[in-house]
Image (cartoon, rainbow, N blue to C red):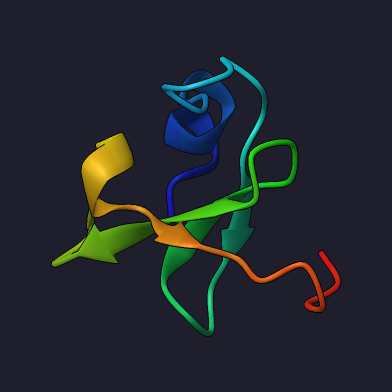
Amino acid sequence: MDKKLLDVLVCPLCKGPLVYDAKAQELLCKVDRLAYPIVDGIPVMLVDEARPIPAEVEL
């Protein structure tokens, strides 16, 4: 993931910062506990496409 792109992207729901998970190829929002997928190198920044992160998973 390009560092400049990561600096510009924010969570579409809360406008908060995102954390890049290279292993899972996802962008994580710690506030909303959502994981946005990265498909073919393109972040899918749609709330409807985001995966909820269970409360028992530490971010």
- Please indicate, yes or no, whether residue 43 appears anywhere in the rendered image: no
Q: Position of residue 35 (x, y in %)?
A: 49, 58
- Going 58% across and 26% down the picture, which residue do you hit? 7
Question: In the image, is 16 to the left or to the right of 12?
Answer: right
Q: Position of residue 10 (x, y in %)?
A: 52, 24
Give the position of the C terminus as an image quadrant.
bottom right
On screen, residue 31 above or below 21: above
State the residue in front, 45 or 5: 45
- Going 66% across and 22% down the picture, which residue do you hit? 16
Question: In the image, is 19 to the left or to the right of 57?
Answer: left
- Going 50% across and 30% down the picture, which residue do you hit? 4
State the residue in front, 23 or 30: 30
Q: Position of residue 1 (x, y in %)?
A: 43, 55
Q: Farthest front residue?
A: 55
Q: Position of residue 17 (x, y in %)?
A: 67, 29
On screen, residue 19 above or below 22: above
Count of numbered circles in the view:
0
On screen, residue 32 above or below 55: above
State the residue in front, 5 or 54: 54
Q: Farthest top residue?
A: 15
On screen, residue 28 above or below 32: below
- Please indicate, yes or no, whether residue 3 appears anywhere in the rendered image: yes
Question: In the image, is 11 to the left or to the right of 57?
Answer: left
Q: Farthest bottom residue?
A: 23
Figure quadrant of residue 46:
top left
